[in-house]
Image: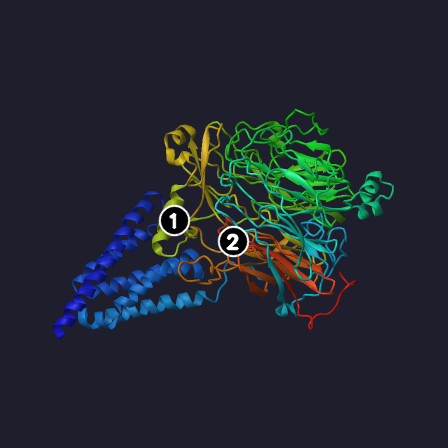
Amino acid sequence: MKVFFMIKNKMLLYFISLVLLLISVVLIIGGGWLISLGGSFYYLLCGAAIMASTVLLVKHNAWALILYAGMLGLSTIWSVWEVGLNWWQLVPRLWVWFVIGLVLLSPWLRQTIIKPCVASWLLLVSIIFTAIVGIASLFTSPNEINGKIENTDLISVNPSQAAGEEWIAYGGTNAGLHYSRLHQIVPENIHKLKEVWHIQTGDLPTADDPVELTNENTPLKVNDKLYTCTAHGWVLALEPETGKTLWKYDPAISNGGTGTFKGWAHMTCRGLSYYDSDRYLKQSPNNAIARKVKSSPCPRRIYLPTADARLIALNADNGERCNSFGKDGQVDLTQGIGPFTPGGYYSTSPALVTKQLVIVGGHVTDDESTNEPSGVVRAFDIHDGHLVWNWDSGNPEHTSPIAKGQHYTRNSPNVWSITSVDEALGLVYLPLGNQTPDQYGADRTAATEKYAAGLVALDIATGKVAWNYQFTHHDLWDMDVPAQPILVDLKTQNGIEPAVIQPTKQGSIYILNRKTGEPIVPIDEVKVPQGAVKGDWTSPTQARSRLNLTPPPLQERDMWGATPFDQLSCRIRFKSLRYEGQYTPPSLQGSLIYPGNVGVMNWGGVAVDPVRKIIFASPNYMAFTSQLVPQSEVQKDETQASEGAGLQPNRGAPYAVIIKPFLSIMGFPCQAPSWGNVAGINLADNRITWMHPNGTSRDNTPIIPLPFPVGVPAMGGPMTTAGGIAFLSGTLDQYLRAYDITNGRELWSVRLPAGGQATPMTFLGKDGRQYVVLVVGGHGSFGTKMGDYIIAYALPKSKYEVFRGKIH
């Protein structure tokens, strides 16, 4: 029996030694590679120490434990020196070495192979030291900002900017605050919030759908109905208090005769638009058009943009087409656009209804070719659909409707996101995208260089430019202005100013006077990296607001992974890429783009509490890589030519581009968490007062769900209320969460049956209850679970108070 145990122990010893030898070889080779790139010496030295310990272990030499104890202790010191007491960065560096140390300290090894000695005690001390450091890091929050916003100098809210009992437009109103004056749900009672109804629309993904099939809709509550649209453009009118379907409309989206939607870039419906002639009659009782609409069969209308480039007017009462609008109730948005691939042009975002006009922009597929549809914005008559004006950023001075048979400027910058309007000033605000291709700009026109990736204010009546402000000069990073401009009156040192707040992908939050376009919060032109690819150029500076959520530049120590090995691989990749900070130009070598083109903020934008003077934001922090590929190489490589592996073809440009998230060999982000936060900005002093990681890894860990609170990205926007509550649901884990807007503390959460990549809304029901409604359908390219749910929450009937007529 004794012989048996000796053989068994020797086999275990050799197995452990083999594992340690393989580990040391990987570290030595990888560490040497990293040093050759100018990186840390740690991994090479660590590998050498483990190899030496392995050799001594095979020889039954107690120095194996002493050497390993020194390696573990020094690794702990090195880790703290690099990242401080940050649990999520310390653990991946040390846990493998910690576990190996426990194995080496196991009784069978100490007693049979290496007799108990001082070496064992030294290793025990090293293990305890590492454990103490790890435990201590649990009680620190180095990346959080803890504070509370307590503004006492409050101003009254402009009712035209904030939603009341209804939710009449995508952002609550056409000012886009995502704020409701309802205050029935407050921090003291939100724990009683329960689901009161849910429905399933029946619109689920099929095998013929594109990858980026998304459910991003924010419903409207108006006309005693709840209106929503699905990814395939179905419109449903629901009874707000029960979810009962009152009517449904299917636009029967055409796939261009292909029989499939697979080649399309996107398929989504972010929102609908509502028109009520009564409102305009009250404002302009002598308006002949409004009186005409009032007498028509469609005095109340829903406007639906479809994925096959139509704008459809529906009777808001019964879902029938308003035949007086355009031809048979629809306007063909392909008129004057020219040829494009199916799905390559349409309006993903809701149209803007204002002053007898319905104004609509359009999505244009990124990086497909240099001959894509125009980014024109058009204003149609609200009643009959005739074209009133068009603003083409490639031909900005000519806003009169183009003649039949003419075409708008091909490839001009587009407006794919949500627009806003100030009817008192007579201005509509457009968040501009870029001219494709995004990563190569040598052939862009002067008009493009002026208007792209900025905010443009147009005169409502004529479409003429009132002012514009560009946020990214000569954009080579796909820094489209992605979110709805927010119109709010702010108290400044100059008194109450009409402001427009513009969240951006690059992290800056620009605050301008919405009448003049002049900055209210200073904007600096900062020097940025130079050296674009041959034939192109870079702007020497870029505009950065002094109010921003832009992350600090990445360093090698910020590289992350689940283990030291994929962290080493990320360090090698980091040092192999071109990276000189934000706005590093795309390159043939491959460049690290941080923040990436998904943005710090995207179409979900931010929400503003105008009374408390707080911006609630959910910034994302994900790095991407961008590598230019000469077209000659693409043509030779059939794998790349198939447009797989993130390759965008850029036909007509000298370079294609490969865009990928910056991930480790195990599929985790290469930069350390948090990857998604919630943040509170005090508009009284324009400072970030609090910021916390948001969301867990529950739905993104293999095999079993592990809800680590690392902070995950969110795709979808927040909503705030006068009750001091902010709601957000867009995180990679499937939760709707509520927060105290003054300090960011999570107050309540509920598990969702699918991804909640949409923005919540709220309204007051006929029963006097405040409802919170969310579309829960998932997001194809974001990778969340797909579904077809619409869910409503409210306080229990016996627990709420009626606040009708008492909104803030």
Q: Residue furthest right?
A: 286
**Within-10-Å neighbours for mark 1: few <14, some 14–19, many 20+:** many
**Can the viewer see residue 631?**
yes
How far across and how far down the image is residue 587, in percent? 44, 35
Q: Nearer the viewer, residue 271 or 161?
A: 271
* Residue on which the image places disc 2: 786
At 83% across and 45% down in the image, what residue appears? 281
Please name which of the two marks, 1 or 2, marks the residue nearer to the observer: 2
* Residue 149, visible in the rendered structure: no
From the image, tell me which residue sits under label 1. Answer: 570
Of pointers 1 and 2, the one earlier in the residue sequence: 1
- Residue at 73% of width from left, 38% of height from top? 325
* Residue 72 vertical position relative to residue 536 in the rendered view, above or below: below
Q: Nearer the viewer, residue 200 or 214?
A: 200
The x and y percentages for residue 21 are 23, 56
Position in image of residue 105 (x %, y %): 26, 69
Q: CA distance from mark 1 to mark 2?
A: 31 Å
Where residue 17 sits, quadrant-wise, is bottom left
Q: Secondary structure at mark 1?
A: helix
Task: Name the quadrant of the C terminus.
Answer: bottom right
User: Residue drawn 79% across and 62% down?
Assistant: 805
**How far from the left and from the top, in percent, is residue 432?**
62, 38
Quadrant (top left, top right, bottom left, bottom right) of the N terminus: bottom left
How many marks on residues?
2
Q: Amino acid at mark 1?
A: Cys
Q: Is residue 498 left or right of residue 127?
A: right
Residue at 74% x, 62% y is: 766
Instruction: Give SS at disc 2.
Output: loop
